[in-house]
Amino acid sequence: MRILSGIKPSGSLHVGNYLGMIRPMVESQKRGELFCFIANMHSLTTLFDGGQMANYTEEAILDLLALGIDPDASVFWVQSDVPEVAELTWYLNNVTPVGLLERCHAYKDALAKGLAPNHGLFSYPVLMAADILAYQSNVVPVGRDQKQHVEVARDIALKFNSTYGEAFTLPEPEIIEELSVVPGIDGQKMSKSYGNVIEIFGAEKAIRKKIMSIVTDATPVEAPKDPDKSVIFSLYKLFASPEAAKTMAGRFRAGGLGYGAAKQELFEAIWEYFSKFREKRERLAGNQDYIREVRRKGAEKARGRLATTMEKVRKLVGVV
Ligand code: ADP
Ligand code: TRP
């Protein structure tokens, strides 16, 4: 089984990215061969500062290695280090109906907001299809918001296969249901675009401040509270042990647990959860030669893995 997933380097990673996508990806390394890449070409659709782009990419390499991607066991690379994917995108563009892309949420949302989307954003799902299909991926673990894009990749694969002949495996999205929408500090879905995130590798003070600013109602300390209606508890149970979560739920229901104290415990749970990853990240950041080597070897491995597919595709479309 080939499992593939990519992550856009468009800012600091948050705990929603971790639970919705990175942790399942790291765990999938036990199930089969993982193809994991940094989708920097996708970030170009919305980020127009080259210096920042390069920085974000470097940060994302450190983040993923620190969070458990094993570059020896898996194929781990930066998207733009494999130019064949841009080439494949062009072949796929020509079997992709415009109507299919017009139905995609990211594009529709941009239109609904009165923005004038660029062509890169419009054809974002085609580049994503090239990422997935180039490596003959079977399974694509993503958050719920990316499910449609994986389905589009499947439609494009079907269209290519029926136009030219069998070239691509049909991929399946894989969603981790109970974690698929991690709430942010305002109770909406945690997302960079809502400004409600808790960063994984943020400074202690900043993370504490974010958590202390979680929106709560005016229920007094003594009153019993429903843990399942609280953002604090919803986040706490994702990071604490099952026993600790059960204890906190009991204290919510019994009354006497104030929101301030619960937030403090949530901070401790999150800080502790990521402590070993923080230490690993610091060690890696001090060893840039190793990081460069990981990047070089990763690109070489990835290019090796798509070579056969690319040869076949070129032959089928008739560019050789
Ligand atoms: P953001 O919404 O912050 O811009 P991205 O769209 O870059 O995040 O998401 C990167 C990955 O993390 C995607 O697979 C996405 O589904 C997942 N993800 C993002 N936010 C959440 C969340 N709140 N809960 C679960 N998964 C999430
Ligand atoms: N679009 C994905 C996101 O926003 C990133 C991505 C690019 C991706 N190519 C992919 C995810 C291929 C899975 C498979 O997070």
Image (cartoon, rainbow, N blue to C red):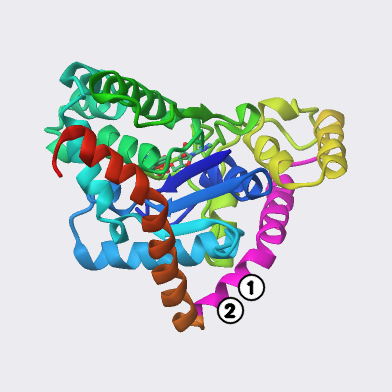
Q: Which residue is mark 1?
A: 279
Q: Bin the neighbour count of mark 2 within 10 Å (Cα to Cα): few under 14, some 14-19, many 20 and up.
A: few
Number of marks in the image? 2
- Report whether 15 appears left or right of 269: left
- Quarter assignment of residue 161: top left
On residue 120, which mark appears? none
In the displayed structure, 85 sits above or below 207; it is above
- Report whether 198 appears left or right of 231: left
Q: Does the residue tagged 2 have its C-beta within 8 Å of any atom of ligand 1?
A: no
- Name the residue at 18% across, 33% down: 317
Label 2 and label 1: CA atoms lie apart by: 6 Å
Q: Which residues are magenta?
A: 257-285
In the displayed structure, 148 sits above or below 205; it is above
- Quarter assignment of residue 134: top left
- Name the residue at 30% across, 57% down: 82
Q: Position of residue 41 (x, y in %)?
A: 27, 51
Q: Which residue is mark 2?
A: 283
- Can residue 122 be seen here? The reply is no
**Closer to the camera, 217 or 56?**
56
Q: Bin the neighbour count of mark 1 within 10 Å (Cα to Cα): few under 14, some 14-19, many 20 and up.
A: few
- Can residue 177 be seen here? The reply is yes
Q: Position of residue 265 (x, y in %)?
A: 74, 51
- Report whether 85 appears left or right of 297: left
**Mark 1 secondary-structure assignment:** helix
**Mark 2 secondary-structure assignment:** helix
Assess whether mark 1 and mark 2 are in contact (beta carbons under 8 angstroms).
yes
